[in-house]
Image (cartoon, rainbow, N blue to C red):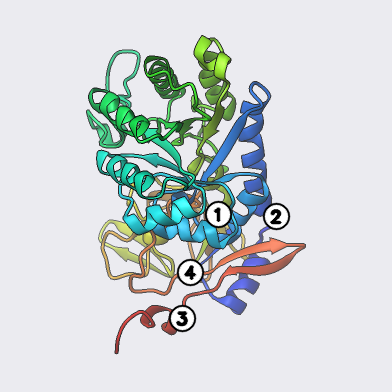
Amino acid sequence: MGIIDYQLIRQIDERLGSPFYLMDFEKYQQNISSFLTAFRKRYPKTIAGYSFKTNYVPALCKIAKDEGCFAEVVSEMELDIAVKLGFENIIFNGPIKRPLALQKAIKHHAIINIDSAYEVDYICQYAQNYPDTELHVGLRVNVHLADAQGRSTVQCGLREGRFGFPHDILAENIHKLQKAGLTIESLHGHTSSSDRAAFNYKVITDYMLSVCEEFMLNDLRYFDIGGGFFGAAPEGLDVSGRPTYEDYAKTVLGLAMKNAWFMNHRPYVVIEPGSSVVSNVFTYYTKTYQIKHIGLKNFVLVDGTVFDVKPTMHSNNLPHKIISNRELQGSVKYDVVGSTCMEKDVILRDVSLPEMKAGDYIEIRGVGAYTIALTPIFINYLSPILSLENNQVKVVRKRQELDDVIKIYQL
């Protein structure tokens, strides 16, 4: 993407304002390619379905399409975006699929991974009403993730996840679909974990293989292990002990390719990367306006906001650095706080920085996942997204304006 220095950041600020995001197209392409290579060199029939919910910036999704990815969507909105961008291959997941959304998915030949019994009933009725319509049906299974000691690793420390079909009702729902003349083309095992460990994918793969064997899903085309992987770590983040793309590929395929059912039927393996390919693709820049010393605390006031960089309000300090036109000296412990009227708007907490001055910029790395899609329209206009192409600044998303905010309201 080129050298990012004070002069460039200042020029962007003068032209388009601060704060803003910079997006690295090349890094995104490299991440997708590296992830797919890790799988395909072991098993060529591997497909990536890019997770729209993680970051659905259209320019980003177009790159995924150009790289041969399917669109993995979980709502009617995301489905509409995928169709608008020309995706011919769509995976429709998610816990709530309204009738209109299902009809759109069917029209565009999407793989519909059914999550609940009400969807089974709808799809069976649709097949009866429109017997000549081509339907691509899959099932999402509920996987209980646990580590080698039997402790749950389901996201947020939950004992049980709520998505997909538990084993005790699989048989009746598979029977309903088959009775309606429908072929189960896809099995979906996505299960969000708290640790993103490679061992989780051993559990997922092992359970999915057992389902394929038990229910003789011999027409299965897509063995979809889902997403939730680690990867795409920003510079400055300690990744020691974290799984790599290679670790996931070895874990999943090392198990699957020893399984007789899998090797006899050779379905496509589907991975659904999101954070693992986009986290380090976006970097955020915000400008310092004021330094405050109140009691025992030192505050750096910036024009950005925590809602732009970690809207989930997690407690981790993201990798960062100061960009200035002066020699940086000293070391002071600061809280870097944002521009909203909320005490919890803390971008960096208790970080040691050089002595800060108004006009300094702060670079926050690793903000590509669950930021753009989750950032609320709250107090400030949404920040622009920019890219650097041949040393030229290109606007990927303009800064939000008044009309963008109020045009959906009735005055």
Instruction: Determine contact: label 4, label 3, CB under 8 Å.
Output: no
- Judge whether residue 106 can be spotted in this image: yes
Q: Do residues under tags 2 and 1 come within 8 Å of each other at their CB atoms?
A: no
Going from N to C along the chain, the mark reached first, 1 or 4, is 1
Residue 259 visible in image:
no
The part of the image, by quadrant, that contains residue 179 is: top left
Q: Which percent across, then down, holds residue 322?
A: 54, 57
In depth, the one of 202 and 211 nearer the eye is 211
Residue at disc 1, secondary structure: strand
Kind of residue indicated by mark 1:
Phe
Front position among marks 4 and 3: 3
Crowd around label 4: few <14 · some 14–19 · many ≥20 (10 Å): many
Q: Is residue 357 left or right of residue 296?
A: right
Give coordinates of residue 268: x percent, y percent: 57, 29
Name the residue that disc number 1 marks.
Answer: 282
Whichever of callouts 4 and 3 sits on the residue coming sooner in the sequence is: 4
Name the residue tied to disc 4: 383
Circles 2, 3 touching at the beta carbon (< 8 Å): no
Q: Quadrant of the N terminus?
A: bottom right
With respect to residue 296, does 182 lie above or below? above
Q: CA distance from mark 2 to mark 1?
A: 11 Å
Residue type at mark 2 is Met
Separation of disc 4 and disc 2 at Cα?
20 Å
- The label shown at residue 335 is none
Residue of label 2: 1
Q: Secondary structure at mark 2?
A: loop
Instruction: Look at mark 3 in the image and give the residue it sits on.
Output: 401
Amino acid type indicated by mark 3 = Glu
**Mark 3 crowd level (few <14, some 14–19, many ≥20, 10 Å Cα):** few
Mark toward the start of the polypeptide (4 vs 2): 2
